[in-house]
Image (tube, rainbow, N blue to C red):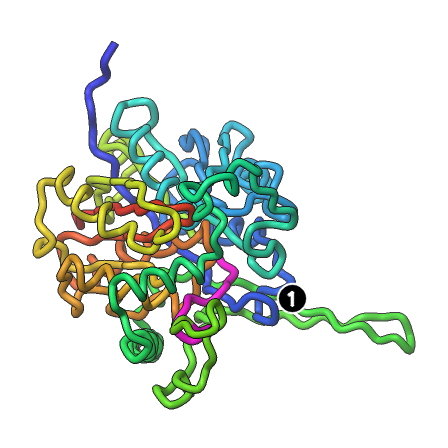
Amino acid sequence: MNKQTQDAYIVAATRTPIGRSGRGYFRNTRPDDLLIAALRGALEQVPQLDPKAIEDAIVGCAMPEAEQGLNVARLSVLVAGLPSTVAGVTVNRFCASGLTAVQMAADRIRVGEADVLIAGGTESMSMVPMSGNKPSFNPAIFASDENVGIAYGMGLTAEKVAAQWRVSREQQDAFALASHQKALAAIDAGRFADEITPVEVVERTPNLADGTQAARTRTVDVDEGPRRDSSLEGLAKLRPVFAAKGSVTAGNSSQTSDGAGCLILASEKALKQHGLVPLARFISFAIKGVPPEIMGIGPIEAIPAALKHAGLKAADIGWIELNEAFAAQAVAVLNTLDLDRSKVNPMGGAIALGHPLGATGAIRSATVVHALRREKLRYGMVTMCVGTGQGAAGIFERV
């Protein structure tokens, strides 16, 4: 039997601050604990909602193993103190995992299978490295030129995009600097405050002399990545890291990061039943495949498809979160689609703010939802390229 479609609304949206991986302030914080903080932060936004009404938690994670393995969604739901009736599933679409989680939750509501769902994402690149602890490609990938691009490092794909779309080193560095400048301006103006759930970090220092340890707790409430000392001169001094004569550097690439995001979605029936106030409506999603060796151009295919599904034009979108995996691919997307740059990443992007892989889609969805309300804009979009050659885009409407 076909079920009547209904709208899916976002009623809560939040994220943790984003920390630098390796030596950042979440280096010893587990990714499930980051997700738990985001879950609790989202629930605090809707105190009138009985947690028993939540049916499932769909959580994105790009490397679901080790500290973020074992179905991190379900485990985090239970440790967060939600009722055992709230189920959980972990999904993986690499960099678009968090956005796919939002799409999956929205779709279940839209076809009438659920009324209240959690969608989110989490990733600790401090604890689980890029590609995981034991990457193992199928040997068939290397048997033909057609598939070998799957195994390319992400930086090499950015080099190929830079060459094919003629994005110069100077353009990449200028884009990177602007990302830091916009992020810092937004932080200084407090524009991230509504979307961030502060996280308490406990730092323990051992005393080897007496066998004790001192514990210090501090509250983290701001993104760690943006650099106030960034400059074109400094960026120009960085060497290419993926190709000897290339143009992609650590300075014009996204930062490896730790973080989590969480949204709560509800049907119109649930809005009335629980007295929930909708923040936005999820109206369309598109996923497209592209050649793996130029995976960065994925949004070039996904954005027009998402706009078509929504019955909109690019000019209708007032706020665009284009994940800056690399400046090379972001500039290529901007130039090819002729997007209005004033609407793209107005508060900076992943080059400054960081990119915790599977969490980024949920994190940037929270950014869009709050930005639409703060700026009184109608439509916003989250879009990104995806490893192995994909592009994703999701469109939100303020209500």
Place residue 181 in its image quadrant.
bottom left
Residue at position x 40%, y 71% in the image: 248
Residue at position x 33%, y 22% in the image: 113
- Look at the magenta stretch and give its main secondary structure: loop
Residue in the foreground of this view, choosing between 178 and 136: 136
Residue 307 among those drawn in magenta: no
Q: Is residue 339 above or below residue 61?
A: below
Residue at position x 20%, y 40% in the image: 283
Dot 1: few (<14), some (14–19), or many (≥20) neighbours within 10 Å? Answer: some
From which residue to which does the magenta span run?
Answer: 249-260
- Kindly identify which residue carries mark 1: 202
| Quadrant that contains the N terminus | top left
Residue in the foreground of this view, choosing between 180 and 206: 180
331 on left or right of 41: left
Q: Is residue 353 above or below residue 68?
A: below
Report x, y in % for residue 244: 48, 73
Report x, y in % for residue 174: 29, 79
Q: Is residue 356 above or below residue 113?
A: below
Amino acid marked by disc 1: Val
Residue 250 among those drawn in magenta: yes
